[in-house]
Amino acid sequence: MSWFNIRIVARLAVIAALGGITAGCFQPLYADHTLNGGPGLREKLSEIEFAPLNVNNGSREARLGVAIRNEMMFRAYGAAVGSAPKYKLTMRLSTQQLAIVIDPTTTRPDIQNYGIDAYYELREIATNKPVINGTAIARVSFDTPGEEQRFAQQRGLRDAEDRAAKEIAENISTRLASYFYSGI
């Protein structure tokens, strides 16, 4: 074996050894129990009550609120139901729609942006003390075909709303998981 090949084999051996040493430090985020035997993240997240949004029934925001709430409940509880709540999560939504590209001949928008800003707050139920709060922002774009295709325009907007709602739910769920995992 040449000197060059021995150096490569030695480097690979060192990398494999370091990987083996640090493999024991890994703990899955959604493990059933922590390394010290405490409750896992899934158990902590199941103690959150996701309050419905306080908006008018039948409005676009009500549909978005239900979609965001359902997605976050699924991420927290999985297929099961949550345990007795210790925390309550409330949210407020604001939405906006902005034309990005406008057709110069018809002055109709070709591409639009849809955005959701969600302010959320997690409180302890027993003390009503705020634990964590923040703002999650989602922006998605969608095409709007010509005026003859009104159904396609509405469907494009609805798909954009659904994508933005899923992004908001993912963002807030990740922040909640980070909070409970760190234990701060």
Image (spheres, rainbow, N blue to C red):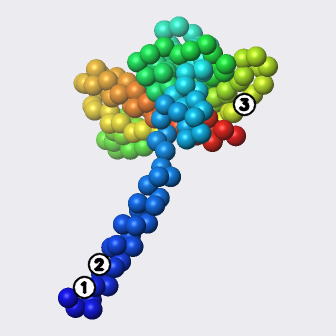
Helix, strand or loop under label 2: helix
The residue identified by callout 1 is: 5
Of residues 152 and 2, which is closer to you in this image? 2
Q: Earlier in the sequence, mark 3 or mark 2?
A: 2
Q: Are marks 1 and 2 in contact (CB under 8 Å)?
A: yes
The amino acid marked with disc number 2 is: Val
In this view, 144 is above or below 68: below
Q: Nearer the viewer, mark 3 or mark 2?
A: 2
The residue identified by callout 3 is: 131
Helix, strand or loop under label 3: strand
The Cα–Cα distance between marks 3 and 2, rounded to whole angstroms, is: 51 Å
Helix, strand or loop under label 1: helix
Measuring from the top left, give residue 38's x and y in whole percent. 60, 32
Image quarter of the N terminus: bottom left
Relative to 54, 17 lies left or right: left
The residue identified by callout 2 is: 9
The Cα–Cα distance between marks 3 and 1, rounded to whole angstroms, is: 57 Å
The amino acid marked with disc number 1 is: Asn
The amino acid marked with disc number 3 is: Val
Q: Residue at x 78, y 25 (%)?
A: 129
Work out which residue is located at the far bottom of the displayed protein and give it. Answer: 3
Image quarter of the C terminus: top right
The Cα–Cα distance between marks 1 and 2, rounded to whole angstroms, is: 6 Å
Q: Residues within 10 Å of mark 2 (few under 14, many from 20)?
A: few
Of residues 147 and 14, which is closer to you in this image? 14
Of residues 58 and 169, which is closer to you in this image? 169
